[in-house]
């Protein structure tokens, strides 16, 4: 079995066991040395062909894509020209977990949120809701609003420790409910999502399933493995919880949203998440540039792809007239939900 294959299997085992995996972690392979643009192109196209998980879901004809882009490759082209062609090639995957990184640039696809309403205004949250006396517990900022604990979490890439969760649980003891705001949270470490979701249940439960792409054919996948929220060994909140999401809630935030959607005491409010359901696999091109792409599929218990985003229970958008007056329409609707 190849070293690349062992790395990928190890990454999936870590993910499904709920241990640390970051949306930005690099697992690199490949050899240094000179390589022609055509060799670099072929290497990238072939690895994506063998291991990318969403060709069928997105209706992508990767062979047709190769035909179009191979005509743009010339062994006399500059590094910048090669980068631009390869970046455009990867953009065809329509995936926020796909990047090409060189010493001088990094490609990305942000269409998963840039074509949608933002539905979040950090300035309004800071001025009108968190105020000046909010509490800070690690990456969590929280404030009591009308007897409801409002918790704002900006990135699952920021480590969430047990003492941070305990601070939230202690403050929530006498609250009428809890609101978790993960709007515009682009993801990060899945273990932080597990830890936060586990604060609102006293038992482990299945919230989805995952499988890994393991070959070039359309059905070349491993068998499905259950995704589970681990049981919290100490203290948990047993009241009602509302989770606020928007289209810029991505990757681990999408997973967190589905974890909470499967909790019978939780409600998702706002706009569907932006997706990001594939665990990134990483590689290195013969010229030393690095890249990543989605190598797994995750699905809900209703057999819907995480990649397409997690739906909300109550759809609410930020109203422009409210925003002009310093009012967060979505948060106000969540507060009223507890009345």
Image (cartoon, rainbow, N blue to C red):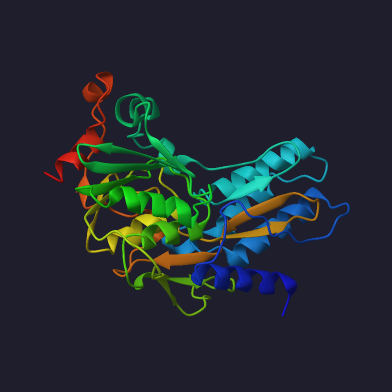
Report the residue that reaches farthest toward the top: 324
Q: Is 163 left, or right, of 271 in this rendering?
A: right
Residue under the image location 36 percent in, 73 percent down? 204
Whole-percent x, y for residue 290 in the image = 71, 51
Foreground of the two, 260 or 286: 260
Foreground of the two, 328 or 143: 143
Dividing the image into 4 quarters, which one contains the N terminus? Answer: bottom right
Residue under the image location 51 percent in, 66 percent down? 296
Residue under the image location 29 percent in, 68 percent down? 302
Whether residue 275 is visible here, answered yes or no, is no
Whole-percent x, y for residue 235 in the image = 35, 63
Residue 215 quadrant: bottom right
- Is 76 drawn above or below residue 257 in the view shown? above
Whole-percent x, y for residue 114 in the image = 43, 36
- Is 9 drawn above or below residue 22 in the view shown? below
Q: Is 266 left, or right, of 258 in this rendering?
A: left
Whole-percent x, y for residue 122 in the image = 39, 30
Report the residue that reaches farthest toward the left: 339
Dividing the image into 4 quarters, which one contains the C terminus? Answer: top left
Number of marks in picture: 0
Residue 13 quadrant: bottom right
Whether residue 181 is visible here, answered yes or no, is yes
């Amino acid at each position: 079995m190849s070293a690349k294959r062992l790395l990928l299997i190890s990454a999936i085992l870590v993910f499904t066991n709920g241990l640390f995996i970051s949306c930005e972690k690099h697992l690199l392979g490949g050899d240094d040395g000179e390589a022609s643009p055509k060799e670099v192109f072929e290497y990238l196209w072939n690895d994506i062909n063998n291991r990318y998980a969403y060709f069928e879901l997105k209706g992508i004809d990767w062979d047709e894509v190769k035909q179009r882009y191979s005509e743009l490759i010339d062994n006399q082209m500059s590094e910048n020209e090669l980068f631009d062609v390869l970046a455009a090639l990867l953009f065809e995957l329509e995936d926020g977990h796909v990047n090409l990184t060189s010493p001088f640039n990094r490609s990305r696809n942000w269409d998963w949120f840039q074509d949608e309403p933002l539905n979040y205004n950090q300035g309004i949250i800071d001025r009108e809701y968190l105020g000046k006396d909010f509490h800070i517990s690690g990456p969590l900022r929280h404030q009591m609003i009308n007897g409801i604990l409002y918790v704002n979490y900006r990135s699952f890439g920021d480590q969430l420790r047990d003492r941070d969760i305990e601070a939230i649980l202690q403050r929530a003891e006498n609250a009428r409910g809890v609101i978790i705001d993960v709007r515009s949270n682009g993801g990060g470490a899945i273990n932080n999502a597990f830890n936060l979701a586990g604060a609102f249940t006293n038992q482990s439960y299945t919230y989805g399933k995952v499988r890994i792409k393991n070959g070039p054919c359309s059905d070349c996948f491993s068998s499905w493995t259950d995704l589970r929220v681990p049981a919290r060994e100490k203290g948990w909140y047993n009241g009602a919880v509302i989770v606020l999401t928007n289209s810029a809630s991505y990757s681990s935030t999408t997973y967190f949203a589905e974890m909470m959607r499967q909790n019978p005491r939780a409600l998702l409010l706002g706009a569907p998440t932006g997706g990001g359901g594939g665990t990134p696999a990483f590689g290195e091109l013969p010229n030393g540039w690095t890249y990543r792409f989605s190598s797994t599929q995750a699905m809900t218990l209703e057999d819907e792809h995480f990649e397409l985003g997690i739906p909300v229970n109550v759809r609410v958008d930020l109203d422009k007239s409210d925003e002009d007056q310093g009012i967060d329409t979505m948060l106000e609707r969540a507060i009223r939900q507890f009345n």
